[in-house]
Every structure is written in C-alpha cells, then in structure tokens.
C-alpha cells in the first residue's frame, strides 16, 4: 500500500490538472492491484445495512484519499456524484456501474449514458468534476470490494445524490466506516 500512496502523492503534486492526473493514478492503481494489495480484514467486511467506505489513507493536506469501498450482495448506492476526481479499481467481486450525463440544469430527468460490470483487477477513472454521476451495486453472489482514490477526503466532502426520474438533488456526506 505504501508504494501506491507514494506514487499517488507524487502524481497529485506534479499534475494539478485532474484530466492529466487521473489516467496516471489509474495506471498506478492497476499496477498495485496486479502486484497484490494486502488489506486489513477490518476494511474488507460488508456492513449488513448499507455499502461502506473504510479509510486506507488520507493525505495530511487532504489532497487525496484512498478508501476500501465494500458492497454486500444486493447492496448499491443511490445515483450520486463526487464533486472531485476519482479512480476506482476492483479488488474482489464484481461491481455493476450505471453512469449518467451530468445535468447542467436543475430538476430535469437524468440521461443514462452507459453501464459496465467491473471485475477484479479492472480500473476506471470513475469521475472528474465535470463528468461525475453514476450508481453502483454489487453484481453477483459475493461482496464487491473496490479501492477508491479521490481528490480530497471523500469521507468529508459534500456530495450530490440524484433522483434520476426528476433530477432532484439532495446533498450528503459519505462519512467513513468504523474499522473497530
């Protein structure tokens, strides 16, 4: 994990443009997953009530964070945005993603623009601040664990959730899961 942290820190410092840094972070995460990451057991367990994100690393200046995101079978997220850039790689299980065109005006139905099932070792730039609306859920009969890297402390960032049929927006903060 320390190698991944160091590489991401160097990338974030060297490339302030998120459209330049996200592919570089994706490459670093792809390599880390291929080599194998050893995650603490407490950061891989599903929460029986909802998906959960566990902090793996938060930069002192909160310029980026790395999380373990866990969905149990049948769990998913609401349609949401991140308000920052993000890169996601699948550690185990399968994640089904449905993406939407980011609305430019309020209170209009969202337009779906693709879906994908992500499998172990696969990595995607899930979001940039200008392209940032999706819904994800566990696909299959085993929990999905993703490694998420965001431009900021994702456990404290105010984010949007969307009602896809109406475009209604609600604001939320993810908060971090408890590893005790």
Image (cartoon, helix red, strand yellow):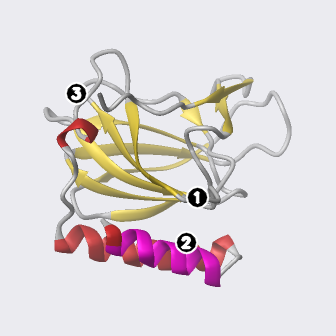
Residue receiving disc 3: 73
User: Is residue 72 found inside the magenta-colored segment of the image?
Assistant: no
Q: CA distance from mark 2 to mark 3?
A: 29 Å
Q: CB atoms at circles 2 and 3 under 8 Å apart?
A: no
User: Looking at the picture, how far across and down is residue 38, in whole percent?
Assistant: 18, 58
Where, quadrant-wise, is the C terminus in this rendering?
top left
Residue 138 seen in render:
yes
- The mark lying in front, picked from 1 and 2, is 1
Callout 2 secondary element: helix
Dot 1 surroundings within 10 Å: few (below 14), some, or many (20 or more)? few
Q: Please tell me which of labels 1 and 2 falls first in the chain.
A: 2
- The mark lying in front, picked from 1 and 3, is 1
Magenta region: which residues? 3-14
Q: In percent of the image, x 66 and y 54: which residue is there?
A: 84
Number of numbered labels in the structure image: 3
Where, quadrant-wise, is the N terminus in this rendering?
bottom left
Q: Nearer the viewer, residue 12 or 117?
A: 12
Secondary structure mainly formed by the magenta segment: helix
Callout 1 secondary element: loop
Residue receiving disc 1: 60
User: Is residue 4 found inside the magenta-colored segment of the image?
Assistant: yes
Q: Please tell me which of labels 1 and 3 falls first in the chain.
A: 1
User: Looking at the picture, how far across and down is residue 159, in whole percent?
Assistant: 67, 36
Residue receiving disc 2: 22
> In which quadrant of the rendered view does residue 27 lie?
bottom left
Dot 2 surroundings within 10 Å: few (below 14), some, or many (20 or more)? many
Q: Nearer the viewer, residue 163 or 54?
A: 54
Q: In percent of the image, x 47 and y 33: which residue is there?
A: 176
> In which quadrant of the rendered view does residue 41 lie?
top left
């Amino acid at each position: 994990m320390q190698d991944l942290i160091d590489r991401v820190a160097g990338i974030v410092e060297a490339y302030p443009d998120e459209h330049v840094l996200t592919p570089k972070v994706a490459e670093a995460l792809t390599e880390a997953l291929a080599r194998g990451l050893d995650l603490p057991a407490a950061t891989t367990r599903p929460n029986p009530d909802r998906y959960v994100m566990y902090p793996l690393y938060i930069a002192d200046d909160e310029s980026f964070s790395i999380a373990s995101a866990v969905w149990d079978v049948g769990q998913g997220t609401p349609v949401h945005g991140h308000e920052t850039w993000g890169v996601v790689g699948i550690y185990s299980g399968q994640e089904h993603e449905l993406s939407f065109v980011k609305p430019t005006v309020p209170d209009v139905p969202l337009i779906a623009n693709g879906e994908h099932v992500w499998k172990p070792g696969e990595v995607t730039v899930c979001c940039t601040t200008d392209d940032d609306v999706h819904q994800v859920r566990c696909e299959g009969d085993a929990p999905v664990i993703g490694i998420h890297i965001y431009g900021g402390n994702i456990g404290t960032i105010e984010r949007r959730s969307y009602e896809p049929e109406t475009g209604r927006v609600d604001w939320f903060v993810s908060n971090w899961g408890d590893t005790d």
